[in-house]
Amino acid sequence: MNIVVDDLSGPEIAAFLNGHVEEMRSITPPESVHALDLDGLRIPEVTFWSAMDGGSVVACGAIKRLDAAHAELKSMRTASHRKRSGLASLMLKHILTEARRMGFTRLSLETGSTDFFLPARRLYEKFGFDYCEPFADYRPDPHSVFMTRLL
């Protein structure tokens, strides 16, 4: 297993992320989908990582710089055949370490409020994220919950 900064140019990561966006759009009303597509992730404020196993993408995650001290966790996803294998925890540990190294002191996120997202919320709780009010450009939304933690 190797976690690498990904420039999002390869076809495998494009397909992996397309699957993520399609899944989010299939379970969440359009106005409440906040998953970024490839173009949204290719902006300078985003650092994106892929977890590679034998040349295949098995997980990913990103942070988006909001200001000098605050970043947003984006695009956390684990391949369906690797869920509940510890990959999400491994990726989140890596991102927390990198966010600290980059000088951020707070990391926040938006995730879904339905039962589908319960495993994600439990993961974030396990890593010390607390529920909070909307941040950045987010607004209250019954389909979203917001979480944050100090680094």
Image: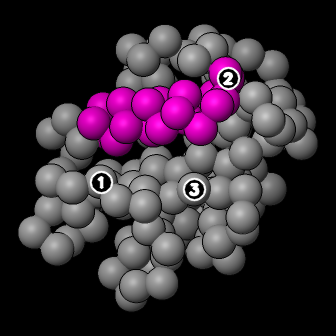
Tell me the quarter of the image containing the C terminus: top right
Left/right of residue 53 with respect to residue 143 in the rendered view: left
Name the residue rendered at 36%, 30% in the picture.
93
Left/right of residue 78 with respect to residue 70 in the rendered view: left
Left/right of residue 34 with respect to residue 149 in the rendered view: right
Lower sequence index among marks 1 and 2: 1
Q: Which residues are magenta?
A: 88-114
Residue 94 position in % (x across, y down): 37, 37
Q: What kind of residue is marked 3? A: Thr
Specify the label residue 47 is tagged with: 3
Q: What kind of residue is marked 2? A: Arg
Residue 60 position in % (x across, y down): 39, 55
Measured in 3D between alpha carbons, the distance from the residue under mark 3 to the one under mark 1, in whole angstroms, is 13 Å
Mark 1 = which residue?
3
Between residue 22 and residue 29, name the one nearer to us. 22
- Position of residue 79 relative to residue 73, above or below, is below
Q: What kind of residue is marked 1? A: Ile
Residue 107 part of the magenta-drawn span: yes
Residue 76 position in % (x across, y down): 46, 48
Measured in 3D between alpha carbons, the distance from the residue under mark 1 to the one under mark 2, in whole angstroms, is 22 Å
